[in-house]
């Protein structure tokens, strides 16, 4: 790729205080996501899973869902979920069930072995999150959660 001289680069519009702050939040979220994924990998090992397997299995703990629905909920491509779902089924942690709403798109459901793996993770994850939360004010955590949920909603509406 050929990069034009700097004087030919487009100039961004003026940055607002809110825009600059949101940019900082986005960058901090990228960093937080990286640290959380590292922790998730360590925690998932307690259940014999990877962080990605835990994420997909987490998408069907409350009810069976299609692979596409799990992808939408978890923010992962359908293809990535399909690969992991097939591995989970192969290992007996999940199973495919008929989908009354769609002939070809089967539902992915957690098995007893899958619930057991998640329980093993919870045994390690609950004390981990309790310990980490002690270093942050609970009202700050509530505000952070509400803000993140608002941003997610706005982005999904866009």
Image (spheres, rainbow, N blue to C red):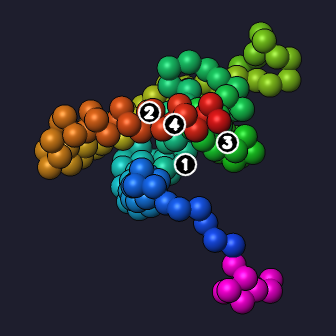
Within 10 Å of the Cα at label 4, are there few (<14), some (14-19), or many (20+) other Cα atoms?
few
Q: Which residue is mark 2?
A: 149
Of pointers 2 and 3, the one earlier in the residue sequence: 3
Above or below 119: residue 40: below
Element type where label 3 sits in the image: helix
Element type where label 2 sits in the image: helix
Identify the residue at horizontal 42%, vertical 50% (top origin): 18
Give the position of the C terminus as an image quadrant: top right
> Which mark lies nearer to you, 2 or 1?
2
CB within 8 Å, label 2 to label 4: yes
* Mark pair 3, 4: CA separation: 21 Å
* Magenta segment boundaries in residue numbering: 1-9
Chief SS of the magenta region = loop
Above or below 134: residue 68: above
Dot label at residue 81:
3
Spot occupied by residue 153 in the image (x, y as percentages of width and height): 53, 31
């Amino acid at each position: 790729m050929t990069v034009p001289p700097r004087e030919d680069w487009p100039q961004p519009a003026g940055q607002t205080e809110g825009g600059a702050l949101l940019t900082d939040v986005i960058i901090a979220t990228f960093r937080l996501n990286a640290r959380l994924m590292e922790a998730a990998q360590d925690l998932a090992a307690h259940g014999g899973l990877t962080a990605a397997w835990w994420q997909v299995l987490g998408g069907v703990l409350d009810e069976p869902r299609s692979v596409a629905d799990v992808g939408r909920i978890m923010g992962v491509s359908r293809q990535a979920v399909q690969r992991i779902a097939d591995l989970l089924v192969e290992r007996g942690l999940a199973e495919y069930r008929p989908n009354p709403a769609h002939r070809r798109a089967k539902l992915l459901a957690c098995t007893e072995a899958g619930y057991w793996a998640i329980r093993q993770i919870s045994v390690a994850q609950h004390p981990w999150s309790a310990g980490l939360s002690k270093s942050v004010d609970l009202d700050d955590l509530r505000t952070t959660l509400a803000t993140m949920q608002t941003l997610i909603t706005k982005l999904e509406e866009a």
